[in-house]
Image (cartoon, helix red, strand yellow):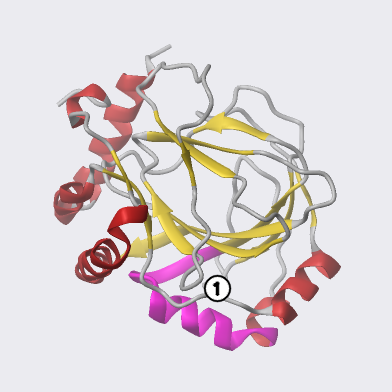
Amino acid sequence: MISEKEFFTQKRKEFLDENPRAHELERWGEYCYVPLDIPRYDFPELVKWFWEVCKPTYKQSPDVANSNYGFSNFDAVDVMPTGEEQTDVWSLNPQPDFLTLFPDILKRIENDFPFKNIKRIRLWSSINRVPPHRDHTRFVDYPSSFRISLYDENPRSTLWLKDCLPEEKVTSPFEFNLPNLDSTNSFVWNNLRTKHSSIFVKGKRKIIIILDRHDLDIDRYHNLMERSILKYEKFCMRSTRSISEYINL
C-alpha cells in the first residue's frame, strides 16, 4: 500500500499529464480557502424542493477519505446536466426534474463559476458529524473544491478546515472556521493541503451545493481568483508550507 504522499503525487501527475495548462493553477496553491466574488445564492423554492425529494446517500466503497463504507452521513440530491451516467463511491439520487424546474439556477451556476461545463451538481444535507477528511478528487495544488452554502439554520458556519500534511492525524481542534458573509455564500478550498470537517447540531438543518465534476476554464478561473482575493483577502485561509511537503516533486 502506497503512502498518502505517494498517492497525492500520482494523482497530481495524472491530472497534469491530461491537462498541460493545469500547471498554471498552482500559482494559487498557498490559498487553502477563498470566498468567491459571486453574489449570494438565495433560492427558497430550491430548498423546499430538496426536502421533498432528498434521500440518504450511502458510502459504497472505501476511498481516500475513509476506509469504512456502508454508512450514511448525508441526505442527497444529484443532478447530471449533461445527462451522462455516473458512478461514485456514494450512492446517487438522480433528480432530472431539477433541469426543468430550475433552469435559471443552472444557467446562473454556468455563468458564475469558471467551468467549460458542469457534469454533476450535488446537494447534500449532513445528518451526522462529518470527521476530518480529504475528498477523493483533485490533488493538484490549487483551490478546486467549489461549494455553495445554500441553506443553513446554524448561527455560524459548521464547516472547518485544517492545513494538514499527508499522513497527519487531526488531533487538535480545527484551525479555521469558514466565515458567514452577507455578500457571498460561494467558496472554494484546496483539497491537497487541507482536511475539512463539519460539526452537526441536532435540529439545525443545512444544505450545501457541491460542484464536483466539471471541466475548468483556466482563464476564467484566474480572473475569478484575482477578483475574489482582492475583495475577500482578510477572510482567506493561506498556507506557509512548500508544495514539496504534500507531494514529491
Residue 97 image point, x, y percent: 72, 78
Question: How many neighbours does mark 1 have within 10 angstroms: few (below 14), some (14-19), or many (20 or more)?
Answer: some
Q: Decide if residue 209 is on the left or right side of residue 202.
A: left
**What range is drawn magenta here?**
101-120
Q: Nearer the viewer, residue 10 or 26?
A: 26
Front position in the image: 182 or 134: 182
211 in relation to 65, above or below: below
Q: Is residue 155 left or right of residue 175?
A: right
Residue 83 found in image quarter: bottom right
Drawn side of residue 2 relative to residue 81, left or right: left
Q: Residue 135 placed where, x, y %?
A: 49, 39
Quarter of the picture holding the N terminus: top left
Q: Please identify the residue farthest to the top as the structure is shown.
A: 1
Count of all numbered marks drawn on residues in the image: 1
Q: Is residue 120 above or below residue 28?
A: below
* Image-quadrant location for residue 237: top left
Q: Residue visible at 32% across and 21% down?
A: 5
Residue at 60% in and 27% down:
62
> Amino acid under label 1?
Pro
As for residue 106 lying within the magenta part, the answer is yes
Q: Secondary structure at mark 1?
A: loop
Image spot of residue 37 (x, y percent): 36, 71
Image quarter for residue 128?
top right
* Mark 1, residue position: 81
**Residue at 23% from the left image edge and 44% from the top image edge:** 29
Q: Position of residue 101 (x, y in %)?
A: 70, 85
Where, quadrant-wise, is the C terminus in this rendering?
Answer: top left
